[in-house]
Image (tube, helix red, strand yellow):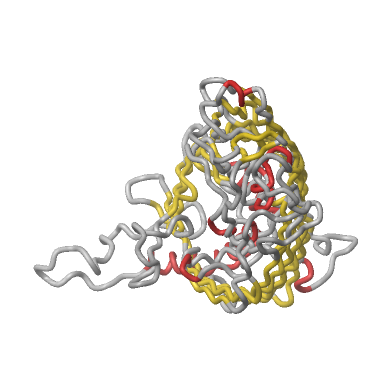
Amino acid sequence: MTATVALLTGLPAASADELADLRANQELLQRRIDQLAQAGGPTPAPGVPGGYGTQPIPGQPIIGGSFPRSFLIPGTDTSIRVGGFIDATVDYYLQNGPPNGNQSTTVGINGNLPVIPLNVHMGTTVPGFPTNIPGSGTVAPGTPAGLVPQSTASSRGNGVFLISPRETRLNVETRTPTAWGESRTFIEFDFAGTNNFSGQSLTAVSDNLIPRLRYAYGTLGGFLAGQANSNFSDPDANSETLDFGGPPGQAGVVRIPQVRYTYAGPYGSAWSISAETPETDIVTPAGNVKSDSNTGALPGGPGGIVNATAGCVANGILISPSVACTLAGNPTKASAPDITFASYWSQPWGHVDFRGVVRPTLTVNDGHLIDKTFVGYGGGISGDVKPWAAPPFGMPGTWEKDDFQFQFTAGSALGRYLNDGADAALATNFLTSPATAAAAGNILVERVREFGYQVGYQHWWVPNLRSNLVYGFSYYAYPSQLIGPTQSIVSNKQLQGAWINLIWSPVAFVDTGIEYTWQQRQTVANLKGQQQALIGKFRVKF
């Protein structure tokens, strides 16, 4: 199967729709290459140097390469392919859309879902809300229990409309035979990262979309080095959605610099181990911090939280009676790579992938008084099943292409390895760096336990028309006594969403479709926010 070949060679496994499209247009595009190779043409006019419009040198036609839609670089054994797609995505938020100016069309877990406006306002009393400790100086005497001490962004209203080409991609792939096995390179960019030039208006003249590196790696035999999908992820089990943000519960949909080795085993199996660049990601009373950011984020931004407290309390301890919860410097580091391993089994009916990860050096260290190291770990199982593709349930027509996808992931201090939009592996009440001697004894750090799952079913109505029904859920056990009441408002303990779509491919390399999604988040403070959106897409591949 294509997925197995991709895994064995170290290339990122394609999603189900990409595999189907590749099979569908391989014959068409290869036929085009063959036609180009056989085509003659007029020679340049006398005195006109070769250049634009120059035909191939007689006797040196374009030669098809070793894989679909590729051609040989003249004078070498290297085959090269240029690919990608032009994408236009339209979002219409029926409920709780983001600001128009950000030009983001990511609705789900990597987009608006983790920061949906909450359905509360300043002064609201919420049962179970972790109110500041009475008598600490941070709340007035007689303040009722459960009073929300923050203002939160009210709903932006309904009817937010967005359209953007930022999911457009461009990639280049090469393959070269060697005595050590095939060597491959792959590099890909899109425009879905930072999209602001020096604070200019994003849409005043032209959308300021900056290229973002997605993949950049090379392989030789079973070895891979560079930036690729985490070995802990299983893209072949990701359900197809038009929403670029995607559902919660997927395992580590991250592209990480790494070194990996894959061994081709018996019975369609592949065994792989990878050392991936580490990151200590923590949540504090002042916000989320990562080991590569060197800053502490204050509550605010997309979630609309404004700090309204006079002091800072964490774990029932008064850190400061007058200064709000802030984080000075960056107290995190990691001293060893994350180790991931996977056992992928491909069968005629689908595949199963067993996955694990160990994060050995998640460290909170201010270089002075605080030095605490934790080990994160987790595992999961994922795969897809084509229930009607083989006896005794074999069915005629398009039913044999139907596919059921599933993922389940759980662990402690998983952080980025469970798709959640926040990536916090540790929770701590650490706030100042370097710590004072008085505060050092009160610093506590805990691992965040988490789990998630995703299920989806794809049905083919006719060979060029398909639908997907998808649900995703994830849960994060943040200790509210450590992160404090301020951060408890914005830190999500539960994310969920459902998607249903209809996708039509009028020709093999064009996808167009429409999708409805409902999504909800619930914070540690038991506050909720939800959104609904319609998503449209037109994508032309090349």
Where does residue 156 sit, x and y in percent of width and height? 59, 72
Q: Is residue 359 left or right of residue 403?
A: left
Task: Decide which of 239, 182 is in the foreground and name it.
Answer: 239
Q: Is residue 366 left or right of residue 429?
A: left
Where does residue 210 sit, x and y in percent of width and height? 39, 58
Task: Decide which of 24, 187 is in the foreground and name it.
Answer: 187
Task: Decide which of 495, 400 is in the foreground and name it.
Answer: 495
Task: Decide which of 304, 246 is in the foreground and name it.
Answer: 304
In the rendered image of this protein, does residue 407 appear above or below residue 364? below
Measuring 72% from the left and 62% from the top, which residue is drawn there?
124
Measuring 64% from the left and 24% from the top, which residue is drawn there?
373
Measuring 55% from the left and 74% from the top, which residue is drawn there?
90
Q: Is residue 462 left or right of residue 204?
A: right
In the rendered image of this protein, does residue 251 appear above or below residue 358? below
Which residue sits furthest right?
A: 392
Which residue sits furthest front?
A: 141
Q: Is residue 528 visible?
A: yes
Where does residue 536 sit, x and y in percent of width and height? 59, 75
The quadrant holding residue 423 is: top right
In the rendered image of this protein, does residue 258 appear above or below residue 485? above
Q: Is residue 268 visible?
A: no
In the rendered image of this protein, does residue 161 appear above or below residue 309? below
Where does residue 255 sit, x and y in percent of width and height? 55, 46
